[in-house]
Amino acid sequence: MTNPIPFAAAAALLLPALLPSVGAFMSSSSSPEGALRNGPAIAMPSSSSLPAAFIDENYPHAPKEAANNNIDGRAFAESTVKNEKPPKILPNGGRITLVGAGPGSPDLLTVAAHRIIADPNNYIIVDRLVSQEILDLIGGEYRVANKHPGCQHEAQAEIYRWCLEGLEGGRHVVRLKIGDPFVFGRGGEEVLEFREFGVEPTVIPGVSAAFSAPLLASIPVTHRGVSNQVVMCTGYGRDGTSPDLIRYHEEQTVVFLMAVGRLRSLCDNLVTKAGYPVSTPVGIVERAGCPDQRTVVGTMETIADLAEEYDVRPPSTIVVGEVVNVLLTEEDFGRVADEAR
């Protein structure tokens, strides 16, 4: 075992039956030194402070004092890990389910997602970019978030207010999010907020556009001899910032979600700062899986102009790399251009 401390910590939280096998790193004492506040024991070194490398690796958001061993490692770890989750159902019957709607086509909903949105008793809070075809399947009351560029914070606060109102009314609240909730969808943030409301949400995964949108446009994200790695990125970081650029690698595919609004600056930065050749193929898949799906294909040099010419809008998935040209033929390019107009 090369790194027994993280394993022991994970075992203490997730697999109590494995604790005896952790050996010297575990304490069988019932004293505070051998327990994580009223929870299971957690592995700690005999020193009163965790090594800086351990804190850096396992608690990247730790304060600098912890990394320098100036605060007690055990106290920091104990304050970082929550003891328990809130209940899934409130005393009044209120509960919440976080559901992935997939890229847009109703045929790509999971069976569980379809069943829960069709229930007329459920109260659905819907992302703005969820397709009309999926909205038509909702059996009960629903509200659509007004999350347009520039007003995300206000819209998110409104979403939380609607969810809280539903929970306080004892309803089954369904938070319907495009794609998969945990792939650049703020799903984790919403789970933490719902826990503050006193309820643990159930999560139903969705089909992420990161892989399904390219497939629906005949673009394989990997292909032997062409691409042996895939990187998923968002076009917008926290508070509208730009995420770190991915350096160019010939046998790499990069998939960008929520990036069409800053496509030109993204391409310029990839060329000038990340080493991408201007001839690198780029494909954009708009409204993947819907009847009006469109695919626009160009290069790092031309794709921004093409996107403006064809008025490409969200939700769109951008694929960068040589895989864009693997399956598409001249016939496809002609058909795509006609459809885009």
Image (tube, grey):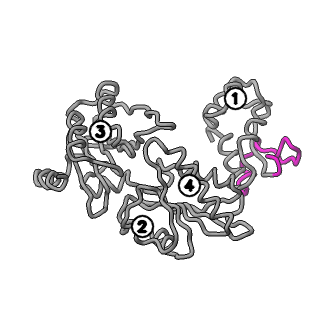
Does residue 23 belong to the magenta stretch?
yes
Q: Quadrant of the N terminus?
A: top right
- Tell me the residue that label 3 is attached to: 251
> Magenta stretch?
16-38
Earlier-in-chain disc, 3 versus 4: 4
Residue at the disc numbered 1 = 51
Distance from the alpha carbon under mark 1 to that under mark 4? 41 Å
Earlier-in-chain disc, 4 versus 2: 2
Report, in whole angstroms, how far the alpha carbon at label 1 lies from the one at label 2. Answer: 52 Å
Which residue is label 4 attached to? 159
SS category of the residue bearing label 1 = loop
Quickly name the residue at label 2: 135
Assess whether mark 2 and mark 3 are in contact (beta carbons under 8 angstroms). Answer: no
State the image quarter where residue 247 is shown.
top left
Q: Is residue 278 above or below residue 128?
A: above
Q: Secondary structure at mark 4?
A: helix
Residue 70 sits in which quadrant?
top right
Please, is residue 317 above or below residue 304 in the view?
below
Give neighbour class at mark 1: few <14, some 14-19, many 20+ (Cα, 10 Å): some
Hey, what amino acid is under mark 1? Pro
